[in-house]
Image (cartoon, rainbow, N blue to C red):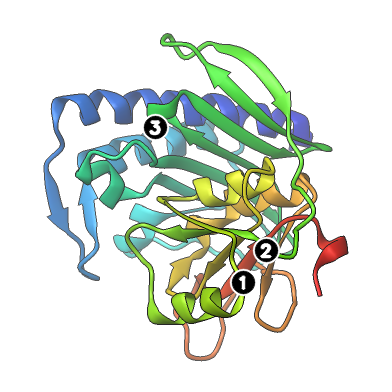
Amino acid sequence: MRDRQDILKLFETSAIAAGRVILDIYKAGAGVRLKGDKSPVTEADEAAERLILDALARALPDVPVVAEEEVAAGRIPDVSGGRFILVDPLDGTREFIGGHDDFTVNIALIEAGIPVLGVVHAPALNTLYLGGAGKAEKLKLDEHDRVVARMPIAARLKGASPSVLVSRSHNCAATDAYIRKAEVLERKTVGSSLKFCLVAEGVADLYPRFSPTMEWDTAAGDAVLRAAGGMVATEDGAPLTYGKRLPGLRTFENPPFLATGRPSERG
C-alpha cells in the first residue's frame, strides 16, 4: 500500500476531479429523486461517486471503500480488517439542490476506527481542505482547478463565549437546547462538512450535532479537524470512531457529537 502522503495526494486529485463533474451538473441543473430513506439524490452524487471509486480501485485495489450511494444500493464491503475508506461524493445534496454553494466532496482513510487522512473539497468555493500525514491545510484553486495556494491551518482555543456552527438542513431541538446553554457569542448556519473545516481553520469554535449523521458525512472533516488540533467527541467525551455497529443505530451511523477547537481549554 502507498504511504499516507501518496494516499492524501490521491484523495486530493480525486476530489478535485469529482468536484468538476459536480459543478458541470450544478450549472446545467440536476434532476432529483428520493432514495429509500426519503433523502434526495442527484446524478451529480452518482457520477462523482463513480469517478472516485474508479480512481480508488485503480490505486488502492485492496482497501475496502464504503461509499454513500453504494450503501444505499445495498453494496457494503467487509471492513472488519480495520482499514477502509469512507466516501461521500456530494455532502450537502440539499444545499446543492437549493442553489447554495456550501456542498462538498469527502474522502477519508480509516485505520483502527480513526480517521487518519481526509480531504474535503468545496468545488463551488474553489476551496479544498486536507488533514493527515502530519499537516492540516487549506488549498485555493483557480477556475481551471489548479492549486494556486496552500495554507497551513490550526484550530483555535475556545473562548468563554464560543462561535457556533449549525446545520442549515438538519438542525434539531436538541442542538438548539445545547446552544442555549453554551453562552454563544455567535451562531452561523452552514451546510455540509464545511462546518468541521471552519472549526479547523480557527474561524469558529464549536459544531454540535444531535441530529443523525452517517460516518461518510463526518470522517473527512473529522480528519481535517484532528490534524488541525481539534477534536470530534461523543457526549461522554470519547473520540468519535468509525466502522461502528452501535445498539439502536444503523451500521455506520454516528451518535450525537461535538466538534470543537483545541482541547486545552475545554472544561
Classed neighbour count for the residue bearing mark 2: other residues with Cα under 10 Å, few (<14), some (14–19), many (≥20): few
Name the residue carrying label 3.
51
Q: Amino acid at mark 3?
A: Leu
Q: Amino acid at mark 1?
A: Glu
Residue 91 visible to an observer of this rendering: yes
Q: Give the residue drawn at x 74%, y 78%.
A: 237
- The residue lying toward the viewer, choosing from 94 and 133, is 94
Look at discs 2 and 3 and give the one toward the viewer: 2
Dot 3 lies on which element? helix
Q: Position of residue 131 (x, y in %)?
A: 70, 40
Q: Position of residue 168 (x, y in %)?
A: 36, 57
Mark 2 vs mark 3, CA separation in Å: 43 Å
Q: Give the residue drawn at x 56%, y 20%.
A: 140
* Cβ atoms at labels 2 and 1 below 8 Å apart: yes
Classed neighbour count for the residue bearing mark 1: other residues with Cα under 10 Å, few (<14), some (14–19), many (≥20): few
Dot 2 lies on which element? loop
Mark 2 vs mark 1, CA separation in Å: 6 Å
Disc count in the image? 3
Q: Position of residue 63 (x, y in %)?
A: 62, 48
Q: Give the residue drawn at x 74%, y 65%.
A: 160
Residue 63 visible to an observer of this rendering: no
Q: Toward which corner of the image does residue 207 lie, by quadrant?
A: bottom right
* Cβ atoms at labels 2 and 3 below 8 Å apart: no
Q: Position of residue 194 (x, y in %)?
A: 51, 45
Identify the disc placed on residue 161: 2
Q: Amino acid at mark 2?
A: Ser
Q: Viewed as shown, does residue 172 lie left or right of 263? A: left
